[in-house]
Image (cartoon, rainbow, N blue to C red):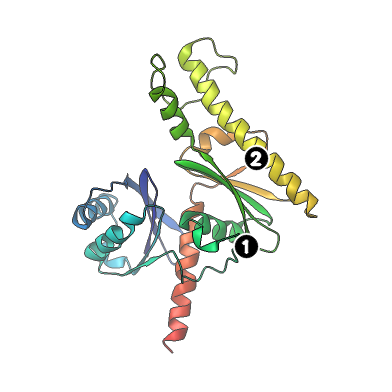
Amino acid sequence: MILAIDTGNTHTVIGCIHANGEIVEIMRIESNLYKTEYEYAASIKLVLELNGVDLSEIEGAVISSVVPPLTVVLKKAVKIVTGVDSLVLGAGVKTGLPIVIDDPGTIAADLVATAVAAKEYYPLPCIIIDMGTATTVTVVDSKGRYIGGAIMPGVSLSMNALTAGTSLLPKIELTPPNKEIASNTVECMKSGIIYGAAGAIDGVLSRFTEALQAGGDEEWSIVATGGVASTICPCCRHDIILDDNLLLKGLHIIWEKNRRNKKKDNR
């Protein structure tokens, strides 16, 4: 079993994955810049034990992080809890994914992981929507290359900005409105946030699919992942596959690829 850890700006997701790729447990803890490695070690150990995970079965770990100050802290925390050294997704790590953008060194680790999984599990070309603190829409082309995408404010970020920048609009729960044309303040906010986000995604998808068609592609797949994807994507007009575990799947593929290469190097 390995630990696959995805550290985002708001939450850190920990997945326990068997050698066959089966994800058996998924846990979520807060991403906190002020925690030490020992505090993170305590949190990781606690959630693993609460979920009945046998620490002795953990043979490896792989980390994807978009919060650089936490990367080293989490690597140390995993070492404290499990005794294993983590593979950190970044420069020098084998992914099998050609990255064809202006500066490949600037691509975020989470985008690499989701692209690797999309390339493995879905028909190409594939458009990937990842809805976290930011919403990203990226493309793996028909040749299996990561060719770029778009970044927009995430749903929670937009919702927080709306309430923080106004005096009378309250904080609300992100649930679908009762009807499209809402008739009270809270429902109007839900309608604007959810259908606005869905409309923005649809707009980007329409432009991307037009670009793919112009390049000669006739079919493509669209897959979405991330915390609020299950709320927003059903309101989109495009056919979108939901895959909550896309990033963890990508991390497992990357870990296996590097483990095999390490074995070859040691022969």
| Residue 212 pos. (x, y %) | 74, 51
The part of the image, by quadrant, that contains residue 210 is: top right
The part of the image, by quadrant, that contains residue 200 is: top right
Going by the numbered disc 1, the residue's amino acid type is: Val
Instruction: Tell me the element at label 2.
Output: helix
Q: Nearer the viewer, residue 124 or 152?
A: 152
**Gap in angstroms between the C-alphas marked 2 and 1:** 20 Å
Say if 57 sits above or below 67 in the image.
below
| Residue 254 pos. (x, y %) | 48, 66
Which quadrant of the rendered structure holds the C terminus? bottom left
Say if 117 sits above or below 35 in the image.
below
Residue 204 numbered tag: 2
| Residue 43 pos. (x, y %) | 24, 50
User: What residue is rendered at 44% in x and 41% in y?
Assistant: 133
Going by the numbered disc 2, the residue's amino acid type is: Val
Residue at the spot of label 1: 100
| Residue 44 pos. (x, y %) | 26, 54
Q: Are marks 2 and 1 in contact (CB under 8 Å)?
A: no
